[in-house]
């Protein structure tokens, strides 16, 4: 048995110094920021004092609570590869020689069949699959690659917003969406492996039933049947976890996926 040391093995002073605010405002870029989970992420980071660069197809909401939101917003369609590359250039211009402390790949689409029906594998066209892959998978990879020099400068974090549909059948999600999200989870692992040595962490969050416009009618019934907590999640509950994954509080969390679903996956 080893003798208990009279000296604490943890260098608390060094830890405190490492955590101390260095006076620089951190910068985050968030896609799909115009509504739903993305909008909650924007508000949460803003409340924590971050500078927030946003991207979506639509203009920034005029009811947003901060004036600079409008000038820091980029309108771009992530289903178009040229537009993705153009938005990388525009984000680089906004950053100049500054680091990017976090990139949140949140934008996502979930196509439906006729009358909002689940778009199963046998009904999915190559065109739909390509479009969904572009927004949900390829754009996150291109954005990460395109901004990586800035992210490395900050030893920053990337968070991909995947989904419970990426690892189990979902009554409404469908094949294109599910395969794109499964691939996004795999991309998270791959990027975490490739970038770990540079100090950049890459993780994902996999929401379940979160109250936004992406949900289909009938979600209440799924919640009743599958979610032990018997309620939907709020966009803010996802945003808090995303913020945690971008903060120093998660400094040794890498290559993982956090389920935010009230226990739906168990
Ligand atoms: N809500 C849920 O229960 C749930 C569950 C699991 C996973 N998720 C994931 O969480 C993320 C956010 O979902 P949400 O529920 O907040 O959905 P939402 O309310 O439909 O918001 C989607 C966001 O993505 C943006 N977007 C969509 N297509 C785009 C495109 N082609 N180019 C650029 N931006 C685009 C939208 O902005 P514009 O329309 O202005 O472009 C919007 O800001 C998605 O990745 C989704 O798959 C959600």
Image (cartoon, rainbow, N blue to C red):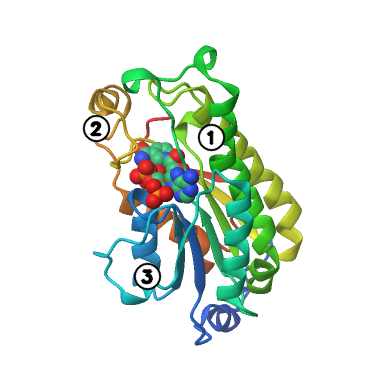
Q: Is mark 2 within 8 Å of ligand 1?
A: no
- Which residue, given by chain and number where applicable, does mark 3 sit on? 70
- Which residue, given by chain and number where applicable, does mark 1 sit on? 132
Q: Which of the two discs, 1 and 2, sits closer to the camera?
A: 1
Q: Which of the two discs, 3 and 2, sits closer to the camera?
A: 3
Query: SS class of the residue under badge 2?
Result: loop
Q: Quadrant of the N terminus?
A: bottom right
Q: Horizontal placement of 115 versus 105: left or right? A: left
Q: Position of residue 264 (x, y in %)?
A: 37, 30
Which residue is pictured at 44% across the width and 73% down the height? 50
161 or 98, nearer to the observer:
98
Name the N-terminal-most of marks 3 and 2: 3
Q: Is mark 3 within 8 Å of ligand 1?
A: no
Query: SS class of the residue under badge 1?
Result: helix
- Which residue, given by chain and number where applicable, does mark 2 sit on? 230
89 or 108, nearer to the observer:
89
Can the viewer see residue 255 in this picture?
no
Name the N-terminal-most of marks 3 and 1: 3
Q: Position of residue 89 (x, y in %)?
A: 63, 65
């Amino acid at each position: 048995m080893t003798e208990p040391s009279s000296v604490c093995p943890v260098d608390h002073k060094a830890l405190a110094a490492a955590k101390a605010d260095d006076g620089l405002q951190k910068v985050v870029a968030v896609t799909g920021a115009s509504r739903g989970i993305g909008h909650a992420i924007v508000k949460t980071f803003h409340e924590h004092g971050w500078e927030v660069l946003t991207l979506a197809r639509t203009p920034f909401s005029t009811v947003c609570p901060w004036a600079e939101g409008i000038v820091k917003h980029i309108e771009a369609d992530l289903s178009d590869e040229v537009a993705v590359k153009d938005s990388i250039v525009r984000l680089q211009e906004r950053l100049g020689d500054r680091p990017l402390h976090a990139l949140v790949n949140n934008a996502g689409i979930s196509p439906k069949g006729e009358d909002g029906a689940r778009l199963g594998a046998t009904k999915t066209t190559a065109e739909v699959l390509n479009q969904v892959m572009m927004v949900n998978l390829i754009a996150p990879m291109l954005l990460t690659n395109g901004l990586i020099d800035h992210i490395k400068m900050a030893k920053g974090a990337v968070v991909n917003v995947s989904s419970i549909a990426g690892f189990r059948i979902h009554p409404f999600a469908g094949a294109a969406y599910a395969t794109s999200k499964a691939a996004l989870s795999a991309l998270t692992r791959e990027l975490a492996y490739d970038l770990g040595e540079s100090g950049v962490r890459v993780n994902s969050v996999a929401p379940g039933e979160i109250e936004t416009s992406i949900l289909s009618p009938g979600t209440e019934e799924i919640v009743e049947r599958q979610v032990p907590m018997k309620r939907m999640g709020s966009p803010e509950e996802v945003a808090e976890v995303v913020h945690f994954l971008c903060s120093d509080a998660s400094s040794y969390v890498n290559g993982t996926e956090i389920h935010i679903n009230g226990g739906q996956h168990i």
